[in-house]
Image (cartoon, grey):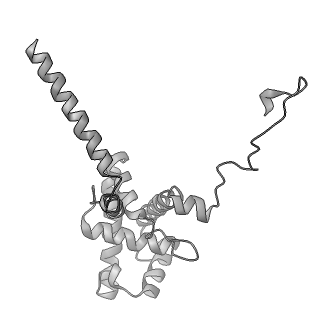
Amino acid sequence: MTLHANRGNARRTALLRLGALCGLTLAGDIPAALAAARRTPAAALLTADELTLTGVLAELIIPRTETPGALDVGAHYTIDHLLDACARAEDQATFRAGLARIDTVAREHAGKPFRALPAVRQTAMLRALDGGTAPFTPADIAAFRKLKSYVAFAYYTSEPGAMRELAYLPVPGGFTGYVKVTPKTRTWAI
């Protein structure tokens, strides 16, 4: 009986502490700290260099215009999370090899890593990659197209991508709060 009573007290104490913690998060700078942590999460799968390169590539694929770009919405962190949580090991390896290949070609042709190249050279290199011109192979093209699909998914499932770029309407056509119902009204159609 004492063992069960101690477990009950421990559970109550834990719940009280959790409630106090939740109450504390509503005041002061704690919500700001939590929001900042969400904006800059730690990488799950990719190295810091791979994550940075993914961010640069994402911003070139969906740049900032009058709406936020892919880098602004943290698409590279979403891609990292998707790769870690959803992709098979061979898909992860293919993605990472594609990043390495882009960086290798940049070093071979410009003497610098891809992220250090001027934006004009980066764009020209990505156009060559997307178009399949030398030195890129069909495997490189497939890896880049997969990267573009990850960027598009990460961007358009973000709040700014969906709400500002796509102008998603949660209730299309408006909302009518009061509808007069008569005996002839088809209530199943309201």
Q: State how many labels appear.
A: 0
User: Where in the figure is residue 148, as x and y percent of width and height?
Assistant: 48, 63
Q: Residue at x 41, y 64 (%)?
A: 74
Residue occupying the point 64% across, 49% down: 170
**For residue 176, what is the image quadrant?**
top right
Residue 152 picture location, percent across and down? 51, 61
Residue 187 sits in quarter? top right
Residue visible at 34% across and 78% down?
Answer: 105
Residue 77 locus on image (x, y percent): 36, 61
Between 15 and 128, the residue placed more toward the observer is 15
- Pick the residue in front: 64 or 50: 64
Closer to the camera in the image, 53 or 26: 26
Q: Outermost residue toward the top?
A: 1
As drawn, is 45 to the left or to the right of 186?
Answer: left
Residue 181 image offset from top left, x and y in percent: 84, 30
Look at the picture and state if 44 lies above or below 39.
Answer: above
Query: In this image, 141 relative to 19: left or right?
Result: right
Q: What residue is rendered at 31% in x and 51% in y?
A: 84
